[in-house]
Image (cartoon, rainbow, N blue to C red):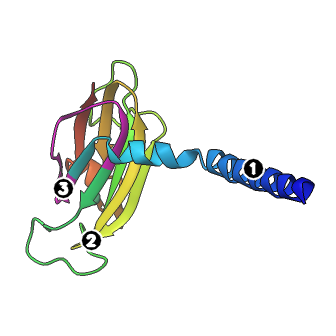
Amino acid sequence: MKRLSIGVAGLAALTALAVACGGDNEAPAPSGAGDASGASLAVNLKNWAIEPSSATVKAGTVTFRATHKEDGHGGHGAGEAGATHQLVVARLEEGAEVGQTKFEPPVLNLANIKLGEEKTGKAMLEPGRYELSCLVVDGDKVNHYKEGMYALLTVE
Ligand SMILES: [Cu+2]
């Protein structure tokens, strides 16, 4: 009887160990909690400007909340210029300025944001200068970027 009870206790300890290991395997969860404490930025997309809620943000995981709530003109229908926008986040090339399309491969691209819509995404930003841009071109006529849909974001 004693041996049996030891065996059961040993099994229980083994099970507890297995549960503990299972918890360790879910290591990404704590980093997710870290994301929640990271910076967030609201970005207003309109015809024709990109307006971040702050011109500077702390390095790390940044949550971008892109909204398209103003059409800037009177009533755009689907397919018309400015009907949809985009938020591209990319680090500027060394020595480049915004508005020159001189940025590195994007770290975030929230595309096809229609009037009244909001899209959210996260990106890991290192200290430096980033460009926020909308690269939509409506029917080869209206190039949103050339119309002024870009903004500088400084990451500290
Ligand atoms: Cu646009």
Regarding residue 100, the answer to whether it shows in the image is: yes
Q: Which residue is mark 3?
A: 44
Instruction: Examine the residues drawn in magenta and state their main secondary structure.
Output: strand
Frontmost residue, 131 versus 36: 36
Q: Bin the neighbour count of mark 1 within 10 Å (Cα to Cα): few under 14, some 14-19, many 20 and up.
A: few
Which residue position holds label 2?
117
Residue 143 visible in the snapshot: no
**The residue tagged with tag 3: helix, strand or loop?**
strand
Instruction: Locate the N terminus by quadrant.
Output: bottom right
| Residue annotated with mark 1 | 13
Disc tally is 3
Name which residue type carries label 2.
Answer: Glu
Question: Ligand 1 is in which quadrant of the figure?
Answer: bottom left
Tell me residue 64's x, y (percent).
31, 50
- The reply to whether discs 1 and 3 touch (Cβ–Cβ < 8 Å) is no
Crowdedness near tag 3: few (<14), some (14–19) or many (≥20) residues, C-alpha within 10 Å: some
Q: Residues within 10 Å of mark 2 (few under 14, many from 20)?
A: few
Q: What is the spatial separation of the Cα atoms under label 1 and label 3, in whole angstroms?
A: 55 Å
Identified at 14% across, 68% down, the residue is 71
Which segment did they paint magenta? 43-63
**In front of the other: label 1 or label 3?**
1
Specify whether 124 is left or right of 82. right
The kind of residue on which mark 1 rests is Ala
Between 30 and 96, the residue placed more toward the observer is: 30
